[in-house]
Image: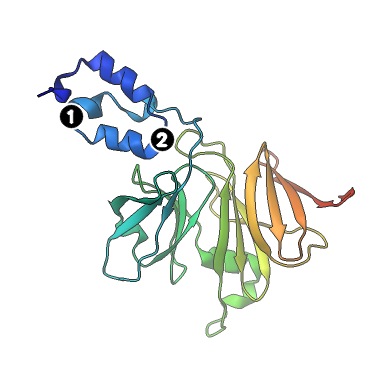
Amino acid sequence: MADWAGLPHDLLVLIAKRVKVMEDFIAFGSVCTSWRTASPKDNFDILSPQLPLLMLPDDDENNYYREFYSLSKGKVSRRLYLPEAKGRDCFPTDQMGWLLTQSLDGEEVNLFNPFSDTKIHLPNQFALRALQNPDDLIEGHEFYNYIKLATLSANPSFTSDYVLVISYSTDVNYLAYWLPGDINWTLFDMDERHGGVCNMTYYKGQFYLLTWGAEIWVVDVQSRDRRVESHLILLGKTRH
């Protein structure tokens, strides 16, 4: 019987570097101690194209585990112990493995990577409330903030130079961004925007936002001087 655990370390490193699917790379390192030693995260090609894993919802409030469905394998491929996700809303951020999580009462908002168990604390929804309208802080005033979408410009695992943009709702739709080190959100708006934001993504230095009014907005968040520029893409013309 082959002694797979006894393969030379240099050979295991070469094999690990040829594994291009993140979930397979994680499984590779779970085989045994020698395979795990040969597959640190630095040996994974983070630029290799990946199909996302879909984190499935869980209706059991007492369950600390979440299942992940693999689009490439067509089945549930992983089940992780994630107490951080218990009783929270979770949103993808367009960056490998990173989620935005918010408690149902809005008191805790975090960036969270379930594979590395890394957490980055963010200003909570009450900070958004105070920025948006201080009068809403009056005791007994009904106010509901719900983060709907979140998008990162870069992977926090590898750089601190990134921007997080969120879309959140009360009775209307608002936008805000956060930079590492900020103690609060920065609100911004797009002139003459019609409808709330229903989807957004980041591509080549800019955020692209799709509204329910069938508009596509291009947003550039200048992190150095904290300036936001936006323009609307229309068929046949562009409006700034």
Callout 2 crowding tier (Cα within 10 Å): few <14, some 14–19, many ≥20: some
- Left or right? Give the position of 151 relative to 26: right
Please state the horizontal and vertical placement of residue 187, each as a whole percent of the image.
Answer: 66, 58
Residue 73 figure quarter: top left
Please state the horizontal and vertical placement of residue 223, each as a whole percent of the image.
Answer: 65, 41
Q: In the rendered image, which residue does mark 2 sit on?
A: 21
Q: In the rendered image, which residue does mark 1 sit on?
A: 33
- Classify 26 as above or below 105: above
Q: Secondary structure at mark 1?
A: helix
- Classify 23 as above or below 183: above
Question: Which amino acid type is marked by label 2?
Answer: Val
Q: Secondary structure at mark 2?
A: loop
Residue 37 figure quarter: top left
Please state the horizontal and vertical placement of residue 165, each as a whole percent of the image.
Answer: 61, 52
Farthest residue in the left direction?
A: 1
Residue 88 figure quarter: bottom left
Question: Residue sitting at 35 percent across and 66 percent down?
Answer: 58
Question: Which amino acid type is marked by label 1?
Answer: Thr
